[in-house]
Image: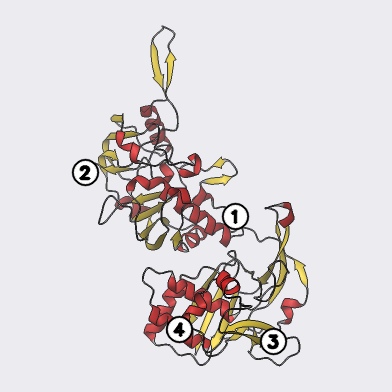
Amino acid sequence: MLILAVRFLSGQFQSTPWDEHVNGGGLEWPPSPWRVLRAIVTAGLSTRDPDWTRLNALVHRFAQSPPIYHSPPVTIGRWPRDSGPPARRGAAPVVAVGGDHIIYLEWPDISLSSIERGWLESVLRRVGHLGAPQSRCAMRTLDAVPQWGPDVTSLLPHSKETGAIRLLAPRADATLGDLTMTVDEIRGSHHRSRPAATQFVPYPRLAAVWGTSVALPMPAASRGSATNIAGVRFGLHGARLPEVAETAPVAEGFRAAAESLYGKLYNLATSPVLSGHEGPGIRRGHGHAHYLPLAESGDHRRIDRVLVWAPDGFTTADLTALAGITRVYFPKHTRLAPLEVSVLDTWSAADVAAMHPPADGWVTTTPFLPARHPHRRRNPDGSVRWSDTAEDEILRELRHRGWPLPIQVEAERTPSAASFRSPQRHTGSSRPPSAAFHVTLRFEKPMSGPLVLGQWAHIGLGRFRPMEVQ
């Protein structure tokens, strides 16, 4: 017996039945066997080295018989949607999942070995959503049959009831190739009304779903609870890892992925920690997340790690969003290939400090970009002085970050900055920073890092390293 537990993280599921139009208002519940298996296959193929043999065997086993559903009570709801064009505003219909937000799928005839179950669990961790992208979910297998609550309804396939619903399921002869066909391939070049090797299986209609339609308020965005985690380190995988000069675009892509996933998980909310903003135009200070691309192993010219570091620490909601990042995409004009990412480890504030040992000398590894332009001022006696210089910016930033003033500051324009890309989000181009500096700092006593300064410190520019560490 195999039991699959699916938890909808935001309490909602939104998808259109295969044989209905997307604007027809139809909602699918429970998620069809074909949709669930397709999501698992997609996750299995998203790894760097897919196990084709096991995926083929998995499809064959799941296709032999449709599952039994054990569904919690659900209600058709309409959550307000205020964004987008006027024609699309209004209320988006969703299935609101009550109780503990878990639905169970049971295949009585499937048996997996411990090795097969372990591999399947690794694939399930990569499943991000079912149906619409906002229907974020988490899947896992169960070792034993849980105790169904009194509010759980079991739905058996091949129902003879009048008014039964039809769910799309794979036939026994379905293959891995059938599950990987795109919708365009199915409905376009192949002119099919539904995917190959599929069938509609009748299930009892869950009365709670179709009884009434109610207006549900948008759930409050949860910011989670505080944790002692201040750093999350990711490994990057891809055919071509980006160069160190592409630090800013890589960091921005990572930040965009984190913010996007957080919004999908928490009903379009914004995380103050991941975004650095308490509200529209309200900056948070320096305690928010810094996205620091690193070149730690192998070719030191290529970025193979990203440290997401928040001096104020992450909440549980932030960590949920970060843990869900499996792939990072970049705007087309950056010419950066998508990257697969995986969480390597999480660090407390003490762990982050230990990875940046104390030193009295610090030097930049990426160019320092000041936030202000230097100005020439005239004193009352007629002499001329400069204000808002790079040195002034460095001292101001150190005070804001709680560091002591250094006994020595050396800032000189560096020609190597010409190879670095500017932040794409704000420039829309790939031009290098116009004013960038190589900086060396000396302090009276050793200081522990990390240390990042400058206008784009939160995306990896102006990052320092201890001078004693090569």
- Label 1 SS: loop
Does residue 314 appear left or right of residue 221 in this picture? Answer: left
Q: CA distance from mark 2 to mark 1?
A: 43 Å
Point out which mark residue 468 bears.
2
Identified by mark 2, the residue type is: Glu
Label located before the other in sequence (4 or 2): 4
Q: CA distance from mark 3 to mark 2?
A: 69 Å
The CA span between labels 1 and 3 is: 36 Å
Q: Is the residue marked by circle 4 packed among few (<14), some (14-19), or many (20+) residues within 10 Å? A: many
> Which three-letter amino acid code belongs to the residue tagged 1?
Ala
| Circles 2 and 1: CB atoms closer than 8 Å | no
Which residue in the structure is indicated by mark 3? 204
The reply to whether residue 318 is in sight is yes
Q: Amino acid at mark 3?
A: Pro
**Marks 4 and 1, Cα distance to the nearest angstrom?**
37 Å
Q: Position of residue 296 (x, y in %)?
A: 28, 54
